Structures are given as C-alpha cells and as structure tokens.
Image (cartoon, helix red, strand yellow):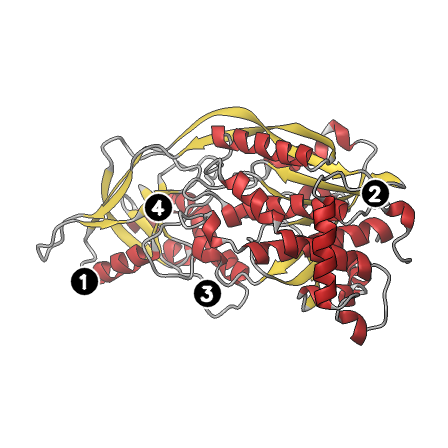
Amino acid sequence: MRTVEREEVIPARSGRTLGRALALAVFFAAAGAPGPAAQDAPPRPYREAVDRMRGIGLLEEKAYDFLSRITAVGPRLTGSPQADRAVEVSLRIMEELGFENVHTEPVTVGRWVRGDVEEASIVGQKNGGGDVPLQVCALGGSVPTPAAGLVAPVVEVRSFEELARLGASVKGKIVFYNRPMDRTLLDTFGAYGKAADQRVRGASEAARYGAVAALVRSLTLRVNDHPHTGLMQYEPGVTRIPAAAVSTAGADRLSGLLEEDPELRLRLRMDCRTEKSVVSANVVGEITGSEHPKEIVLVGGHLDSWDLGTGAHDDGAGCAVSLEALRLIKAAGLRPKRTVRAVLFMDEEFGGTGGRAYARAPQRRGERHLFAAESDRGGFLPVGLAAGGGSRAAFERIKTYEDLFRPLGILFISPGGGGVDIAPLVEQGTVPAAVILNAQTYFDVHHSALDVLSRVHPRELELQAVVLAALAYLVAQEGL
Ligand SMILES: [Zn+2]
C-alpha cells in the first residue's frame, strides 16, 4: 500500500471546484486537519483520501439530490413508463457527473399492473354488525379475482405445516396467513426472511388444498393500516388463485373477529393483471481504471421499485449512494487503478432479471469483476460492513481497513455481503459486499405507501455513500 500519489489526481471538471475547495478548507480547519482519528491511530495510507471524500460528502449531501430526482418520477414498477423515465433520469445524472462509458444495457422484463380495484371487507357478522373494511393490496404477480369479487369463509394459519394439517378442509375458503415477523430479532432482515415464505409461496400452497384466495399479514413490525406488497410466485401446475396482503392492524382485527365467529366470510375484489413483456434497461457508468481498466469494482442498487410509494428507501437509496460514491471519488480528485463502476439494475423486485442480464451481457466479455457491493437495505445510517461472501481471504483483507472505516461510524466488519442483483456475478467468483445499516425502521416503510423521500435523512444517506466510496476506492487500488 502507498499514499495517494500525484498522478492519481485528476482535475475536477465542475465549475464549483473553487467554492468546494474553500468550503473544504473551512471544514478541515474546523475539524483540525488531518482529522481527529489521526491522533489516536498510526498514520495510514488512504486516510487522507477517505477524509477528503467524507468532507465533500457531508458538506454537499448530493446523494439526497440524486434520490429526489429518481423518486420524482414516481413509483417505478418494473416495466412501467415511470421505470423508463428513471432510466433516462439516472443516465442524465451520470452524464452530468462526467462518468465514463455511460450507457444502458437492455433487459427484457415482465409487466404486472395493479389495476384500479383492490378491496376487502369482512361480510356482515352474525352479531348483526355491518361489513368491516380491511386495508389490502394485491401482491405482485397475482391474478385478479372474478370481476364481481369473491366471497368465501376464512381460515387462519400461521405456517404451511398448520395448513397441511387442515388439508382439504380449506377447500373453497380464503387462507389467511397471520404469522408476524419475529419482533425479538435485532436483525430485521432476518425477521423478514422468516415470515416472507407466506407471501411468496402462500397462494400456491393454499391452492393445493383447493383454497380460492390467499390473504397474507403485511411484513412489517408496525401495527397500522398500511398494507405492504411484494412478490408472490405461482408454482407451475398449481391453480393460480388471487393473493393479497392485509395491513397488520387489519390482520389483528380479522383474527379477533374469527375467534368470535369462525364462520365469518370475507369479500375480496382485485383487478390486477399481467401484460406483455417489455424491454427495459440497466444503467451503467464508471470511472475507468488507470492501470487495470478491465478489472471491475462494482457498486449498485436497483432502479425499479414497488408501486405504492416511490421506492425511496427501496431502492432509490441504493441507486443514489452508488451514483454518489463515484462522484465522491472523482470530486476528491482520485483516479482509481481499477475501474469503479455504478450499475443501476432494473427489475430486482420481480426476480432479478436485470442482474442476470448484466452478468451475461456481451460487454462482460474480457471484463473481470473483482468485487461487487450491492446497496438494497434502505437509506439508513451505516453501522457495519459485510464483505467477502464465501472467501475468508477477501474478508480478512477488507477487515484490515477497519481503522479507516471507524471514523465513518463503522463499528464492525463481518463476513458476508451480497444481494439479488449481484448474485449471478458472485456465482462466477466475484467477491460480494454490503454496507450494513441501522435498519430497525426499514420494514415500517418497505414495499408500502410510506416508502417516500421524506422518510430518508440526507445525512444518513450520505454517510452510506461515503462508506461505499471508501470501500470501492480501497479495493480498486489494492485489489483483493
Ligand atoms: Zn429492494
């Protein structure tokens, strides 16, 4: 390792350079150059470069600007006109920032449309009460109900094992999956993972026993009336029945009423549909490596989102921090030895066609993807790094940079990393990574109408970009 050398410094093209330099001078004077961490740790190469990126990032908070431009196009459901606009917007941002080799790569994606009608209500009960409306939303990929809706008795289960025990007795009924996310887990992604099978496979599992629809408790730790959508998948050869999510408050209400009246019936009406596949795109831009341009250090997120909110946390944030990471490297005057590339993937939410298309695109021939950091965990405060995937050696290598990350608020570096979009690269030997965030509130908004720009904090988002920029730059310089 060595310190940043002169020839690595490329002139910044921005007309705001002088203003930025002055502002940074003020920043570092206030902070006491070369930064407080230098006093309690031995001097390290790269500290200056990382400090510079942190200074520029925290001062300018451009990640939030990029996020606001991406979310301004609206919900970016795969295959939708808004998703196309998001491709145009992010292409323009990359060009404005002076990234190199800026282009799109085609991805053929499915197109599911929510439609105009999604309603559910508990039909008038035996104690004489009127209909009780429930807040529901169709799950992505679901077939519609008959145009007039369907009315059927409801059976509540908490697991597929429980469903199997009920067997044919669920025939003609709506299966209501009501297993909540495990509140006792600190890892909210782990809690989500333990409950998501109901949403993804619930319809086909219920249809095996003759159920007419599946209703799934929303995957969130909050109890409120916002339904959370997400992907569901039909198993080949099994009858396709409609699948919807019900808000957590609605799920509790329904469960309580079922206890009083196990015979109660639910009305469900949805007119979602699947249309013809369309051609969409991944968006790619880079800082070409000065010594090993064909060796790629990738940072990325996904441009598509669900359609209830504007996908600010999921995953406008991942796109914004990827763009900002490259901007910070450039703005700090650094020219990495290996190529640092930002890839904004299309169609993560409906199964990752963008990630697969990227990995097998003709442009990949002759390229070697050393490292890929996927940001798809929201726009929250970074607290750790997961890196290395299955490679202990790569993890150990990145772990040696710990003291560079500590001043950025990184408390730990652990083995791991990865994501849907980079999975095809990881299968080919690319080392994965992910910035770990304080995601305690992520599932409050995830896949719901609450996932909007105002739920993202500019400074927390920026810190994620700074950590990503430092990580990408270090790997681009040092290799793995
Ligand atoms: Zn996502």
Residue 294 seen: yes
Name the amino acid, label 4: Ala
Name the amino acid, label 3: Asp
Tell me the residue that label 2 is attached to. 10
Q: What SS does tag 2 mark?
A: loop
Query: How far apart are the alpha carbons under marks 3 and 4?
Result: 21 Å
The residue under the point 27% across, 42% down is 119
Query: How far apart are the alpha carbons under marks 1 and 4?
Result: 21 Å
Image location of residue 36, percent across then percent down: 75, 71
Query: How far apart are the alpha carbons under marks 2 and 1?
Result: 71 Å
Side of 374 relative to 132 (left or right): right
Tell me the residue that label 1 is attached to. 260
Image location of residue 283, percent across then percent down: 65, 33
Q: Counting residues from the N terminus, which is met first, the one under dot 2 or under dot 1? A: 2
Name the amino acid, label 1: Glu
- Quick one: 325 or 256, which is closer to the camera? 325
Q: Are marks 2 and 4 in contact (CB under 8 Å)?
A: no
Q: Are marks 1 and 4 in contact (CB under 8 Å)?
A: no
Q: What SS does tag 4 mark?
A: strand
Is 350 rendered above or below residue 178?
A: above
Q: What SS does tag 1 mark?
A: helix
Image location of residue 188, percent across then percent down: 52, 62
Tell me the residue that label 3 is attached to. 182
Q: Are marks 1 and 3 in contact (CB under 8 Å)?
A: no
Is 431 rendered above or below residue 279?
A: below
Work out which quarter of the rendered image holds the N terminus and state it. bottom right
Nearer the observer: mark 2 or 4; the answer is 2
Tell me the residue that label 4 is attached to. 214
Q: What SS does tag 3 mark?
A: loop
